[in-house]
């Protein structure tokens, strides 16, 4: 058994399994949290309920990671290694936790099994056919990501021209690398000297990195990159994409205490930062 697999199994083996009554209790807390996430304002009591629900969600996920491994093992030899299969299956587990209705009377594992299988099957259909990027393109994407971070932290322009110059990457090569990156949005290269920010170059008709994550990269990988973003960026993306009912920009603006347009700018910049992280 490969060392990464052994280490992962050891890690998830520390999470206690749930009794049937615990599943019901935790699932109810998760449902309540999802209801509260739709409200504009929460009382202190409701905020505590929301935190409890989120902890319950994490506990349900952790307690069922061994189930993901069990299902993933049945798909070995079809194009993805075991850890990639587990990553895809974890996507299905997360969705199962969000959708599970404890009033229906059956065990969560019975319900989750099919979600996990579907997620792994989708992963095999997409990632199994994904071509690896050339090494030089991967290096360019990493350089662009680091350059964008430096410029953003300094409060400087983050248009593609500036980012490419900071990274030492030819403008056309930078645009091509971004187009080639799997699970990301394509960008049109602005004319030389353009002041357009990268976020203004994101076509609204294209799927977001979070939509792409569900189809290609899996929520596990996306979640790891999301945690590296500023807290406000994380919150906006959660409100806009990671709740059962996506919040409108006007609602997000109210929650942030800013205008709808400012909320849109924050969202788009957060998507760009996430996209660059996932690309690199």
Image (tube, rainbow, N blue to C red):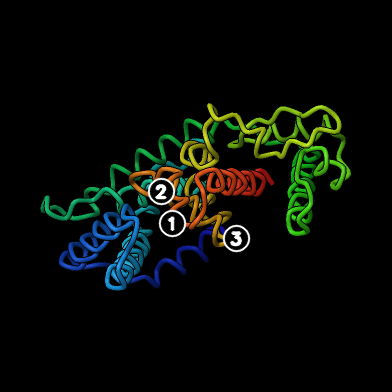
Within 10 Å of the Cα at label 3, are there few (<14), some (14-19), or many (20+) other Cα atoms? few
Q: Nearer the viewer, residue 199 or 280?
A: 199
Above or below for 223 versus 231: above
Circle 2 is placed at which residue position? 251
Q: Do the residues labelled 2 and 3 touch (CB within 8 Å)?
A: no
Q: Residue at x 31, y 43 (%)?
A: 115
Q: Which mark is residue 230?
A: 3
On the rendered structure, is 69 left or right of 163? Answer: left
Looking at the picture, how far across and down is residue 34, in whole percent?
Answer: 30, 55
Earlier in the chain: of badge 2 and badge 3, it is: 3
- For the image, the number of numbered tags is 3
Looking at the picture, how far across and down is residue 48, in whole percent?
Answer: 31, 72
Front: mark 1 or 3: 1
Q: Nearer the viewer, residue 64 or 237?
A: 237
Q: Which residue is drawn at 33% across and 46% down?
A: 244
Q: Give the CA separation, mark 2 to mark 3.
A: 20 Å
Looking at the picture, how far across and down is residue 127, in whole percent?
Answer: 54, 36
Q: Label 3, secondary structure: give it.
A: loop
Within 10 Å of the Cα at label 2, are there few (<14), some (14-19), or many (20+) other Cα atoms? some
Res 73 visible: no
Above or below for 50 versus 101: below
Looking at the picture, how far across and down is residue 147, in whole percent?
Answer: 79, 50
Circle 1 is placed at which residue position? 255
Q: Do the residues labelled 2 and 1 touch (CB within 8 Å)?
A: yes
């Amino acid at each position: 058994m490969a060392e990464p697999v052994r280490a992962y199994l050891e890690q998830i083996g520390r999470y206690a399994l749930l009794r049937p009554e615990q599943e019901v209790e935790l699932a109810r807390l998760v449902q309540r949290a999802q209801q509260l996430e739709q409200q504009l304002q929460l009382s202190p009591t409701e905020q505590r309920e929301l935190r409890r629900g989120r902890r319950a969600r994490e506990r349900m996920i952790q307690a069922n990671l061994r189930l993901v491994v069990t299902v993933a093992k049945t798909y070995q030899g079809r194009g993805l290694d075991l850890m990639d299969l587990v990553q895809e299956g974890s996507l299905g587990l997360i969705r199962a936790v969000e959708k599970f209705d404890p009033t229906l009377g059956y065990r969560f594992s019975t319900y989750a099994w099919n979600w996990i299988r579907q997620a792994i099957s989708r992963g095999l259909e997409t990632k199994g056919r994904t071509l690896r990027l050339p090494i030089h393109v991967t290096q360019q994407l990493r350089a662009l990501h680091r350059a964008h971070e430096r410029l953003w932290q300094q409060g400087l322009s983050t248009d593609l021209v500036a980012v490419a110059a900071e990274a030492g990457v030819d403008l056309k090569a930078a645009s091509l690398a971004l187009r080639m990156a799997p699970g990301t949005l394509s960008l049109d290269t602005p004319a030389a000297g353009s002041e357009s920010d990268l976020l203004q170059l994101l076509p609204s008709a294209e799927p977001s990195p979070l939509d792409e994550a569900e189809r290609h990269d899996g929520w596990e990988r996306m979640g790891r990159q999301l945690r590296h973003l500023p807290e406000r960026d994380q919150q906006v993306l959660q409100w806009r994409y990671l709740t059962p009912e996506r919040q409108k920009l006007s609602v997000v603006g109210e929650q942030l205490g800013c205008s709808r347009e400012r909320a849109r700018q924050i969202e788009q910049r957060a998507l760009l930062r996430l996209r660059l992280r996932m690309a690199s």
